[in-house]
């Protein structure tokens, strides 16, 4: 809500709103180059033309440092809502997609474009109140960038304006007090998942086998054959459906890479797919599947040199 927004931030948002054309929240994003904006009205980040990333910045969570610089704390915990509470599967997927796009800009050393938004209900109710709607959304002509990405702390810092400045520890502590990220003690209690590569892979494999078998498919572990994938998925008649490479991520092991054999198989095998299990080995495990052309979009993927 407006009363939760720093007065200087709210004043800037109001100035942008009054100086620009009257557009709906979807029209604003569409005019920034997101052709399928109408099909994704509830997303929190989008990939626009020219590989430009656009992300929502909630005004209620924008902090202003002593020197006037704006910054925003981004939780890297996709499973829990800001301030606490477990996200629904749909909300978690939106959060993961947003984090993947932000991480993409961070890895590439690029900025992103922002839409500044305030809401009609208290910000803490944004994902739990069915009446939650956008109050104001405006395009921010100033560029934003991800100044830091700290998986160990489950935190990223987004900064408005030129690079080279980061908020102080005192600034960050004050911002945490405003909300937007889970309290430290809650973060410590969150399921950490496996802490060794072997345990992580075993948990991810068990999840994937159980997933496909739950739908009545056959899922055979062929890892030992070194075929360039881990699981063969077939239907009840024995027809091959997918050849799946399984990768898992967890807070202690947030990245993964493909082996040379897996990369080669991705090129030659039409049924090859990458399936990434986030938070493998925990009650909040969730997965997403990628075609060979989409592997670079997978959160946590690191291409070997």
Image: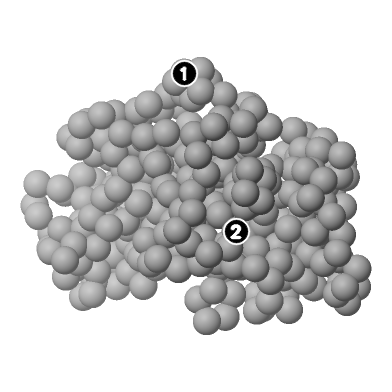
Q: Which residue lies under the disc numbered 1?
A: 189
Q: Residue at x 59, y 67 (%)?
A: 143
| Residue 198: x %, y % from top left | 17, 35
Going from N to C along the chain, the mark reached first, 1 or 2, is 2
Residue farthest front in this picture: 67
The answer to whether residue 13 is above or below residue 200 is below
| Residue 76: x %, y % from top left | 49, 41
Q: Residue at x 38, y 40 (%)?
A: 151
Give the distance between the C-alpha atoms of the residues marked 1 and 2, in whole angstroms. Answer: 32 Å
In the visual, does 12 lie left or right of 197?
A: right
Camera-side residue: 251 or 139? 139
Q: Quadrant of the N terminus?
A: top right
| Residue 192: x %, y % from top left | 37, 26
The answer to whether residue 131 is above or below residue 260 is above
Q: Which residue is drawn at 63% across and 43% down?
A: 66
Residue farthest left in this picture: 225
Q: Residues within 10 Å of mark 1 (few under 14, many from 20)?
A: few
Q: Is residue 151 visible?
A: yes
Camera-side residue: 36 or 267? 36
Q: Do the residues labelled 1 and 2 touch (CB within 8 Å)?
A: no
Q: Which numbered disc covers residue 160?
A: 2
The answer to whether residue 2 is above or below residue 44 is above
Q: Quadrant of residue 32?
A: bottom right
| Residue 23: x %, y % from top left | 86, 72
Q: Nearer the viewer, mark 1 or mark 2?
A: 2
């Amino acid at each position: 809500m407006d009363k939760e927004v720093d007065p200087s931030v709210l004043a800037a948002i109001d100035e942008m709103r009054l100086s620009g054309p009257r557009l709906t929240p979807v029209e604003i994003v569409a005019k920034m180059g997101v052709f399928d904006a109408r099909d994704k009205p509830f997303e929190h980040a989008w990939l626009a033309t020219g590989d430009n990333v656009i992300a929502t910045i909630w005004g209620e969570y924008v902090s202003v440092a002593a020197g006037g610089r704006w910054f925003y704390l981004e939780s890297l915990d996709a499973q829990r809502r800001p301030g606490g509470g477990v996200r629904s599967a749909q909300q978690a997927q939106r959060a993961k997609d947003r984090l993947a796009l932000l991480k993409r800009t961070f890895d590439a050393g690029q900025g992103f474009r922002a839409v500044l938004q305030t809401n009609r209900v208290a910000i803490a109710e944004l994902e739990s109140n069915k009446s939650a709607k956008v109050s104001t959304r405006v395009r921010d002509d100033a560029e934003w960038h991800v100044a830091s990405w700290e998986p160990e702390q489950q935190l990223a810092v987004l900064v408005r304006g030129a690079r080279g400045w980061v908020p102080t520890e005192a600034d960050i502590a004050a911002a945490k007090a405003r909300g937007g990220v889970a309290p430290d003690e809650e973060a410590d209690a969150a399921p950490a998942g496996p802490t060794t590569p072997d345990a992580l892979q075993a948990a991810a494999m068990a999840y994937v086998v159980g997933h496909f078998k739950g739908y009545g498919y056959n899922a055979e572990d062929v890892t030992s054959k070194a075929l360039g994938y881990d699981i063969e998925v077939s239907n009840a008649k024995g027809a091959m459906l997918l050849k799946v490479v399984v990768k898992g991520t967890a807070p202690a092991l947030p990245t993964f890479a493909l082996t040379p054999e897996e990369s080669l198989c991705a090129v030659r095998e039409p049924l090859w797919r990458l399936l990434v299990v986030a938070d493998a080995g925990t009650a909040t495990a969730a997965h997403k599947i990628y075609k060979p052309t989409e592997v670079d979009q997978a959160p946590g993927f690191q291409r070997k040199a």
